[in-house]
Image: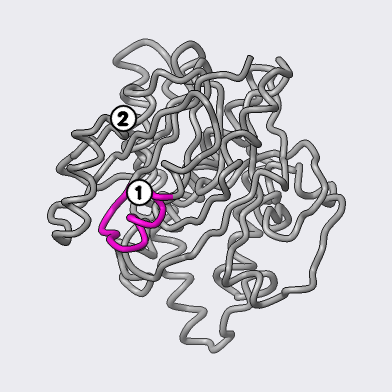
Amino acid sequence: MLPFVSLIIPTYQREAVLRATLRDALWQDYPTYDVIVVDQTAVHEPETEAMLAELSAAGKLTWLRVDWASLPRARNVGIRQATGEIVVFVDDDVQMPPDFLARHARHYQNLEIGAIAGRVLDRLKLADDPDRRIEQLPPAANDPAIAWYHLDLVHTVKPQRVLSARGCNMSFRRSLFTQHHLWFDERFRGSAVREESDVCLRLRTTGLVIWYDPEAWLVHLGEETGGCHDLSTRSPRYQISFYHNHFWLGFKNLTPAQCLRFFAKLFDCHVLGNPPCNKGGHLLKVMTRLFFYLLGLLAAMGTALLAKMSELRSGRSLL
């Protein structure tokens, strides 16, 4: 018997592309599922507002309006609202085939599987290298210190066990959150980069695995505004949050030796601009990125200190 599925769509400042995503969500060829929209947009275009109101009134989706913007918090709100045995997360700028939910749900008859990572047909990355095909991910893709620079869920075509999913196409057993307390960490800031990596790394403590299924695919449009791009990628706040989130992921989940390797790779790729980041190597640009790298490190150390203080007050570990 197929499990009941809750499809959760956090959204922020998206309009036409959100409407298209919702149409795909409601046209799924799957017998038992519901759709939950966690809406962080203060004011929608009239057409989007009318569509959401009509679908909500008809009981075709649950429309949760909130007055803040945080992707991990939106995911947690969606999980708490969900009734499905399985929760599926997609972004608000994706295209899904009609059998998308079925391809996720079919795996959960295997009790060893805790999460499914679906293939992300990212139009920008595919345009850069349209002919690339990966059969087996390299061993480095399962190394928590450097996996993030080798885990390619765009070009990989063979099913296999993976370390993490991508946030725009992933599903979990809801019991991981309600019983094992693997909630999304709302301390991941800004674009919330690495928030899904954090959950996936902590999932390992349950003994369950993450399985990659390239047939559970969707198209990620990668809209330049809205969604996680609520902050300009050139803004100081965005840059600091980007590095903060990487350092925070390491502090929470990695050993000291793994942290050193992770932070060194972060420096090599994002500060020096070496592959696979391939950023400009002009000295001024490198020094600017180094400045934000150090500010992000200090910010993450502050987050870790606050977490430790909270732990001492409550008498239990929050990390």
* In this view, 11 is above or below 46: above
What residue appears at the point 26 percent right and 29 percent down from the top-left corner? 59
Q: For the residues marked 1 and 2, what is the alpha-carbon distance in whole angstroms?
A: 17 Å
What residue appears at the point 23 percent right and 45 percent down from the top-left corner? 52
Residue position for label 1? 189
Number of residues whose C-alpha sits closer than 10 Å to that of mark 2, classed few (under 14), some (14–19) or many (20 or more): some
Q: Amino acid at mark 2?
A: Val
Nearest to viewer (mark 1 / mark 2) = 2
Q: Main secondary structure of the magenta part?
A: helix
The picture places residue 94, in percent across and down from the top left corner, at: 48, 56
Q: Quadrant of the N terminus?
A: top right
The answer to which of marks 1 and 2 sits earlier in the sequence is 2
Q: Is residue 108 magenta?
A: no
The picture places residue 137, in percent across and down from the top left corner, at: 82, 51
Relative depth, front residue between 208 and 98: 98
Q: Is residue 112 left or right of residue 254?
A: right
Q: Which mark is residue 77?
A: 2
The picture places residue 132, in percent across and down from the top left corner, at: 79, 69
* In this view, 86 is above or below 196: above
The picture places residue 314, in percent across and down from the top left corner, at: 32, 13
What range is drawn magenta here? 11-23
Relative depth, front residue between 207 and 214: 214
What residue appears at the point 14 percent right and 59 percent down from the top-left corner? 46
Disc 1 is placed on an element classified as loop
Q: Amino acid at mark 1?
A: Arg
Number of residues whose C-alpha sits closer than 10 Å to that of mark 1, classed few (under 14), some (14–19) or many (20 or more): many
Relative depth, front residue between 119 and 237: 119
